[in-house]
Amino acid sequence: MRIALLFLAAFLASGVEMVEALTIVLAVGITRGWRSTLIGVGAAALVLAVVVAALGPALTLVPIDALRLVVGGLLLAFGLQWLRKAILRSSGYVALHDEAGIYERERAEAQRAGHVERAGVDWYSFTLSFKGVLLEGLEVAFIVITFAADKGGSVVVTAGAAAAALIVVAVTGVLLRVPLARVPENTLKFVVGLLLVTFGTFWGAEGAGAAWPGEDAAIPVILAVYAAVSFALVWLLRRERLVAAGAET
Amino acid sequence: MKYVVAFGRFWWDFVVGDDWLVAAGIVAALGLTALLAHHDVSAWWVMPVSVVGLLALSLRRAIRR
């Protein structure tokens, strides 16, 4: 159960970030050509590989309780950001993430930008695809490393999940050559936020010295409680927004 | 100097995000858990209660902005 939830969390979190990176890469590549764009993607992938290779083994040197405390805290910080955003979107307080709209804006900007060539590459295409893949990829790398940090065997599960997400998103992107606008991104962010907060709570408390009743069996219970609270918050906020809108008209 | 500031801002946005109170609350909740556990008091409930409270508080702050 724990391994399945870890895989799901890493797969969905990686998938969501990769969809966002794909939108930028497609907009730049289609508008300004693929050579410089793909060089930017390759350079970002190289930097990410160095970050993971450097940070991954370094984490094994940290005592397990201290690691759980830090990892738990980081997962909670990430997870609560995702969950908060997903609840605000679901309740209508914030507009849903629009990959098609972002794609069109990126394309228009890529068309307007002038052509500056440095070291034989179109600098605009290179820097935009490099930054897009690096920034989204860092989030993936961070989540994979923090999940994998808990127990030795988890690294295979989380790295495998990230690789599977990369293959699914990249193959779909290459086949469709359009941004993946139909991906229910907010639902995915909701699920990922719940999973990150659940594991963050579990590991953070363990790292601080608390003992969970039922040990690993507490994980699905925490998840169920957070899911119920989150749905209740969406319902309450949505109702509050509609009441406020009704009072104004 | 510009790059140092940008690097710091990137990590702040990355870890702390839109609401610093959530990050501060997480640190405080972990500290309270450690304190109770150190004195052999059952402490597993501190984190779930804090997380629910912080989420509700952060949402309230977000919609008031």
Image (tube, coloured by chain):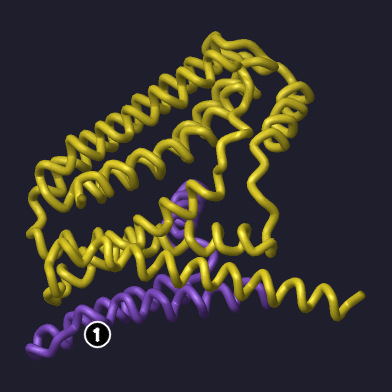
Q: Position of residue A216 (x, y in %)?
A: 15, 61
| Residue A128 in sight from this viewpoint | no
Residue closer to the observer: A188 or B59: A188
Image quarter of residue A244: bottom right
Q: Which residue is mark 1?
A: B32
Q: Examine the rendered structure and indicate whether residue A219 appears above or below residue A30.
A: below
At horizontal 44% and vertical 64% (from top left) the residue drawn is: A80
At horizontal 20% and vertical 51% (from top left) the residue drawn is: A2
Q: Is residue B40 left or right of residue A17?
A: left
Image quarter of residue B52: bottom left
Q: Examine the rendered structure and indicate whether residue A26 appears above or below residue A67.
A: above
> Chain B hue?
purple
At horizontal 47% and vertical 39% (from top left) the residue drawn is: A17
**Badge 1: residue crowd in 10 Å (few <14, some 14–19, many ≥20):** some
Q: Position of residue B36 (x, y in %)?
A: 16, 88
- Secondary structure beneath label 1: helix
Image quarter of residue A69: bottom left
Give amino acid for label 1. Leu
Q: Is residue A46 left or right of residue A82?
A: left
* Quadrant that contains the C terminus of chain A: bottom right
| Residue A19 in sight from this viewpoint | yes
Q: Is residue B57 left or right of residue B41?
A: right
Q: Position of residue A230 (x, y in %)?
A: 48, 68
Which chain does the residue under circle 1 lie in?
B
> Chain A hue?
yellow
Q: Examine the rendered structure and indicate whether residue A136 appears above or below residue A116.
A: below
At horizontal 24% and vertical 49% (from top left) the residue drawn is: A147
Q: Position of residue A246 (x, y in %)?
A: 84, 75
Q: How many marks?
A: 1
